[in-house]
Amino acid sequence: MTHTEGMLRDGALENKTIIVTGGGTGLGKSMAGYFLRLGANVVICSRKADVLANTADELRQSTGGRITFVACDVRKTEEVEQVIARAIETFGRVDGLVNNSAGNFISPTERLSYKAVDTIVDIVLRGTYYFTLALGKYWIENQIKGTVLNIVTTYATTGSGWVVPSAMAKAGVLTMTKSLAFEWARHGIRLNAIAPGPFPTKGAWDRLFPEELARKFSFENRIPLARTGDHQELANLAAYLISNFSAYMTGEVITLDGGEVLSAGQFNFLKEVTDDQWDAIEDQIKSATRTGKTPE
Ligand SMILES: CCCCCCC/C=C/C(=O)SCCNC(=O)CCNC(=O)[C@H](O)C(C)(C)COP(=O)(O)OP(=O)(O)OC[C@H]1O[C@@H](n2cnc3c(N)ncnc32)[C@H](O)[C@@H]1OP(=O)(O)O
Ligand SMILES: NC(=O)C1=CN([C@@H]2O[C@H](COP(=O)(O)OP(=O)(O)OC[C@H]3O[C@@H](n4cnc5c(N)ncnc54)[C@H](OP(=O)(O)O)[C@@H]3O)[C@@H](O)[C@H]2O)C=CC1
């Protein structure tokens, strides 16, 4: 068994229809592909119909699963409602939602126009609550115990400079996840989140890790487990959280980042200390402890 293999058993998502926003590319495409392999019906949506059509064809061929797509800008409520209507029309009902669509780029915040900030916040926060609200109403009305999975970031909790609009919006999504998890638990609706570390995708790398930066910083040095994530690792966790196997979990955010977020640990700079230096340090500390002891 390796981390690049599927984790859940065949048929684990049978009879479930899952909408994956931003499912035409990157991590959304990987999750959609794995959900199909596990027997789910999948609906992918995002702005670019041609990208969605190609992905749907590719995944249909590679998995033999049932997938459809609808072009949709998650910032437009009427388009969000159209996706849900099409999903119900095609597959009879909707059981799960993965809020994965996002916009982001690195920039010193003082260089941003109001519109630049609005663009990111609207895709990430507005898009997520539009979809969640529309489906929540449908689930409550039809007594369906739906499940929402929100893809956030580790800096939704820690905050981060140079991606401030994304950080504000993802923090809002995380708070919505926890708040609604409590409120809608009485309807059997669950909401959880994944906070991924770096997983190579064209969308993220072009906007957050352009070549200029890639030449200067290496993930191998920054991440305790010394590598970036594999898409299957994220798809495995996503499938678990959207499946009935996680039926007792709600309002949770799971970090999947090779330990990257732990770098704030106050003594983590000691990573640089060699074994010889540790011998000397141990002697010094023990000697200081002996001298400091009060005589009996
Ligand atoms: C490498 C480590 C990885 C760690 C991962 C960290 C967490 C990752 C989170 C992610 O979200 S990764 C996902 C990234 N994927 C995407 O962003 C895909 C979709 N993105 C886009 O389509 C664009 O990038 C967009 C800008 C978000 C939206 O495109 P749209 O065509 O709708 O907008 P524009 O009209 O182009 O721009 C709107 C507004 O924003 C200003 N702007 C755009 N880019 C920049 C920039 N690089 N710097 C400053 N400002 C920018 C643009 O100028 C417009 O403003 P005005 O000029 O009109 O005022
Ligand atoms: N890759 C990584 O290392 C990390 C990623 N994440 C998160 O993972 C998720 C996926 O990112 P990733 O796969 O890397 O990047 P992608 O750029 O591949 O995915 C973003 C998707 O969002 C869609 N999208 C953007 N704007 C809109 C919109 N207005 N309406 C509908 N869909 C939209 C895009 O499609 P289109 O342009 O056609 O609309 C695209 O398919 C995001 O939520 C991101 O924040 C979090 C941490 C790390």
Image (spheres, helix red, strand yellow):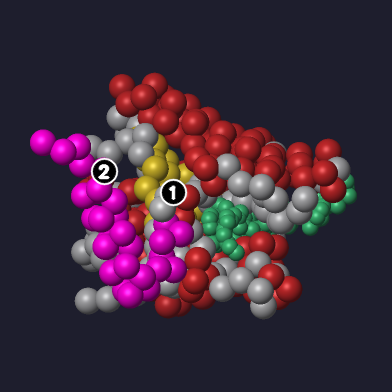
Label 1: few (<14), some or many (≥20) within 10 Å? Answer: few
User: Which residue is the extreme one toward the left?
Assistant: 296
Q: Quadrant of the N terminus?
A: bottom left
What range of the chain is rendered magenta? 268-296
Pick whichever of labels 1 and 2 is earlier in the sequence.
Answer: 1
User: Is 8 above or below relative to 141?
Assistant: below
User: Is 191 above or below relative to 97?
Assistant: above
Secondary structure mostly taken by the magenta-highlighted segment of the chain = helix
User: Is 48 above or below relative to 160?
Assistant: below
Residue 269 is one of the magenta-drawn residues: yes
Please, what secondary structure does the residue beneath circle 1 have? Answer: loop
Rendered residue at 49%/71% (across/down): 221
Q: What residue type is labelled 2?
A: Gly
Mark nearest the camera among 1 and 2 is 2
Residue 33, image x, y percentages: 43, 67
Question: In the figure, residue 179 lies in which quadrant?
Answer: top left
Question: In the figure, residue 25 lies in which quadrant?
Answer: bottom right
Q: Mark 2 vs ligand 1: CB under 8 Å? A: no
According to the picture, the residue beneath numbered tag 1 turns out to be 266
Residue 104, image x, y percentages: 68, 53
Residue 41, image x, y percentages: 40, 57
Q: Which amino acid does label 1 sit on?
A: Gln
According to the picture, the residue beneath numbered tag 2 turns out to be 292
